[in-house]
Image: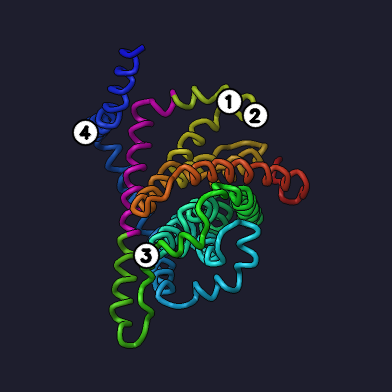
Amino acid sequence: MFKMKIIIFKIKKLFIPVCICLFTIFLLVFSNANLSSAKTGLLLWANSVVPSLLPFFIATELLGYTNVISILGKLLNRFMRPIFNVPGEGAFPFIMGIISGYPMGAKIVSNFKNQGICTNEEAERLLAFTNNSGPLFIIGTVGIGLFKDTNTGILLFITHILACFTVGFLFRWWKSGRKKRTAFLQESSNTIPSKVSLSNLGEVLANSIMSAINTLFLIGGFIVLFSVIISILENSNVLGMLANFISPVLNIFGIPISYSNGIITGILELTNGVCNIAMISNKSISTNIIICAFLLGFGGISITLQILSITSKSKISIKPYLIGKLLQGTFAAIYTYIFLNTFLFLNLDL
């Protein structure tokens, strides 16, 4: 028994170094395919992510130097506290997370924790439901761009938000018996930035732009990295083996095996996954839409690691986020199934 524990410990200790070594080797072995995938990921970041997120990131950073957050806190505390068990200021990451998409909600929640606006437990509750896909991506890219149907994009966005509300309500009981907020506020060192004025406007703008650009470069690195990882998994046939592994689970839900590659890809990286799923030819297109609803709610491992890189400095546990995203993906898929079977004009099945 003791020897078995030692072996397991050694395997855990060597797992990540071995994976990194294999990744480096496969970078050389599949260099041509990896180069193409890296270019595709870089173009995706430059053409889609930067134009859509940079203005929101800068605006959010600037709003942090105003009293907008405290005003929202006073106005919406009567709603946020009883429904989600978080302070009224939590409405800010919730709203901005919905409007601008991943990973805006997590970035604001991390700032809140650092500034003493919320406790660690409240930050974990907020993280579980304020980090979402934005309307530009769901309605524009997925609905109009991939499914060629605006109604499908609107449906996916509505069910995405409904699932988000559901997760937020369920997480109101997360660690609800821990240290009270008043005690936390007495202990916390408040690091809220100084307010913006004409005298420090240039400095505030520079800090906001630099912070936004740093976050965007972080996102870009993850997009390129996971584009290459997916390319390696495809060329080494690992993706195919993983697809065969989950096929029995798909059979239980009546999902054709042809979706397995797209689902695995989506679990790894959201954008590539929904693209693959949407392009699968099937008379029952509702299956494609429901799977995309799950992937949009879950977000993928790539986004999860982005969130971890943002929240780790604030010492916010990633566990509630993972549970919340699995629940959100599941609820989004269920709500989408109900809508498609209730409102027949939304159903595109042939």
For disc 1, the neighbor class at 10 Å (few under 14, some 14 to 19, many from 20) is few
- At 44% from the left and 26% from the top, the residue drawn is 240
Which quadrant of the rendered structure holds the N terminus? top left
For disc 4, the neighbor class at 10 Å (few under 14, some 14 to 19, many from 20) is few
Q: Amino acid at mark 1?
A: Val
The label on residue 249 is 1
The mark nearer the N terminus, 4 or 1, is 4
Q: Are marks 2 and 1 in contact (CB under 8 Å)?
A: yes
Residue 152 in view here: no
Relative placement, left or right, of 257 versus 335 is: left
Q: Gap between marks 2 and 1, in whole Å?
A: 7 Å
The mark nearer the N terminus, 2 or 4, is 4
Q: Quadrant of residue 209?
A: bottom left
Q: Quadrant of residue 157?
A: bottom right
The mark nearer the N terminus, 1 or 3, is 3
Residue bearing the label numbered 3: 189
Q: Amino acid at mark 3?
A: Ser
Q: Gap between marks 2 and 4, in whole Å?
A: 39 Å
35 in magenta: no
Relative placement, left or right, of 158 versus 13 is: right
- At 75% from the left and 51% from the top, the residue drawn is 345
Q: Are marks 3 and 2 in contact (CB under 8 Å)?
A: no
Q: Gap between marks 1 and 3, in whole Å?
A: 49 Å
Q: Secondary structure at mark 4?
A: helix
Q: Which residues are magenta?
A: 215-241
Position in image of residue 27 (x %, y %) = 25, 35
SS assignment for the magenta stretch, majority: helix
Residue bearing the label numbered 4: 28
Q: Secondary structure at mark 3?
A: loop
The label on residue 253 is 2
